[in-house]
Amino acid sequence: MPTPIRFVLVHPRTPENLGAAARALKNFGQMEWTWVRPPWSPDDARARTLAVGAEDVLASARLAPTLEEAVTDCSWVVGTTGRTRVRPVPMDPEAFAAEAARRPGRIALVFGDERTGLRRDELARCHALTRIPADARQPSLNLAQAICVFAYALSRAPPRSIREISRPGTDADLQRLERTLDGVLRRVGFIRSGRAGVAPLVAPWKRSGLTRTEIRLWESAIRTLARSLSDS
């Protein structure tokens, strides 16, 4: 069985794409997906027309008002992009699939809307990036085509390894840790008002796959340091 992934579609614009995407997911054994702020419902007739044999996948789509809510319980959040000059350097689909097979916890693969892709702020909150290396003369893929490429890559990756590991930290845990660090560093003047936050500092944490215990230990250390500074 392929590594199960939560496919997250941020503001998908075209119901036909959703129907075709549902069929691609079922073709390669993927069954979980979430739509963020969709202007269409899963029972839209235009989507059903293209979801041949995958009407159950189409109907199972979970709806979420924000990207944060869609990935809050995921331990690894990977954004898709067509951009080449971004950091961290995007993995290709095969590398993403191989890494997903060794990661514990829930994994989210995030797609932007068909016109603009993911915004910079949406890419920045992802833990890693991936990109389909299309021909530079025609780099943009249809949303359903892109989903099909990743679903196929996942189906070709080694089976997901089962390891004894502490509970992996979720995106919600990492966001809480980021807010804790940001608050302390602003208090001591390391980050000044109007400046960017601590995203570059926490990026290694997002890549490393911290467990919940490790995240709580970091939070405790940061809060203890903050109390010490307040008392001094």
Image: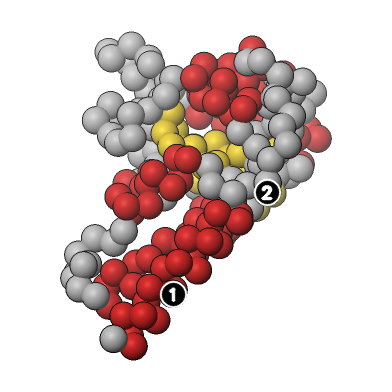
Camera sees residue 12: no
For the C terminus, the image quarter is: bottom left
- Type of amino acid at the residue the image marks with label 1: Thr
State which quadrant residue 212 falls in: bottom right
Residue 197 versus residue 117 in the image, above or below? below
Camera sees residue 82: yes
Element at label 2? loop
Spatial CA span between label 1 and label 2: 24 Å
Is 226 displayed left or right of 212 in the figure? left
Is 72 displayed left or right of 52 in the figure? left
Residue 159 versus residue 201 in the image, above or below? above
Residue placed most toward the observer, 139 or 55: 139
- Residue at 68 percent across and 46 percent down: it is 166
Residue placed most toward the observer, 78 or 216: 216
- Percent x, y for residue 93? 49, 20
- Type of amino acid at the residue the image marks with label 2: Arg
- Residue at 53 percent across and 57 percent down: it is 215
- Labelled disc at residue 111: none
Q: Which residue is mark 2?
A: 167
- Percent x, y for residue 210? 53, 47
Q: Residues within 10 Å of mark 1 (few under 14, many from 20)?
A: few
Q: Which residue is mark 1?
A: 224
Spot the residue most to the bottom.
Answer: 231
